[in-house]
Image (spheres, rainbow, N blue to C red):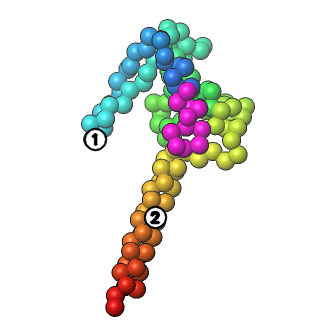
Amino acid sequence: LAQPYGKKAKKALSRAVLDRKVWIKWKSKTDEEHYVGVVHFGRAGLRGMGPLTVSFDLAMQGAAWPVVGSTMFENIDFAAKFAKKQGWGLWATPSPIPPWTWRQQQERTADFADLHRLCNQRARSYINRD
């Protein structure tokens, strides 16, 4: 949620599922024992696309990024491209950063801060030697 637009995306997700009946179609299970599924709501979709998914809804609002390189989520890619073209949601921000890139940047920043702290500790211990 610390990522830019994260809190607004959380609100969009809450609005999409709060007090609604949803169902999950499980797709797979990762090596780390995480389940991958698609959350659906409603019965009808847009022009033969099947039931609406929460992911599609969020992508259409500009509140979610598409999964890159996944054929399982082609409709979400379409929705995200449409939202981007319209300048909706996160696409209205000056330079949106994909969540996977943002996480890597945060990890590098944390690593640099740890290194900086360690260098300062060693410098202090070296200076304080008499």
66 left or right of 120?
right
User: Where 110 falls versus 128 (above or below)?
Assistant: above
Label at residue 113: 2
Cα distance in 3D space between marks 1 and 2: 28 Å
Camera-side residue: 123 or 25? Answer: 123
Q: Residue at point 40% right, 79% down? A: 124
The mark nearer the N terminus, 1 or 2, is: 1
Q: Farthest top residue? A: 43
Magenta stretch: includes residue 3: yes
Magenta stretch: includes residue 116: no
Structural crowding at the residue carrying mark 2, measured as other residues with C-alpha within 10 Å and reported as few (<14), some (14–19) or many (≥20): few
What span is colored magenta in the figure?
1-11
Camera-side residue: 42 or 1? Answer: 1
Q: Residue at point 31% right, 35% down? A: 34
In this rendering, does residue 78 appear at all? no
Camera-side residue: 71 or 124? Answer: 124
Residue 84: x %, y % from top left: 67, 35
Could you tell me which secondary element the residue under label 2 belongs to?
helix
Q: Label 1 amino acid?
A: Glu
Foreground tag (1 vs 2)? 2
Q: Label 2 amino acid?
A: Ala
Q: Which residue is mark 1?
A: 32
Q: Where is residue 127, by image quadrant? A: bottom left
Structural crowding at the residue carrying mark 1, measured as other residues with C-alpha within 10 Å and reported as few (<14), some (14–19) or many (≥20): few
Residue 33: x %, y % from top left: 26, 36
Q: How many marks?
A: 2
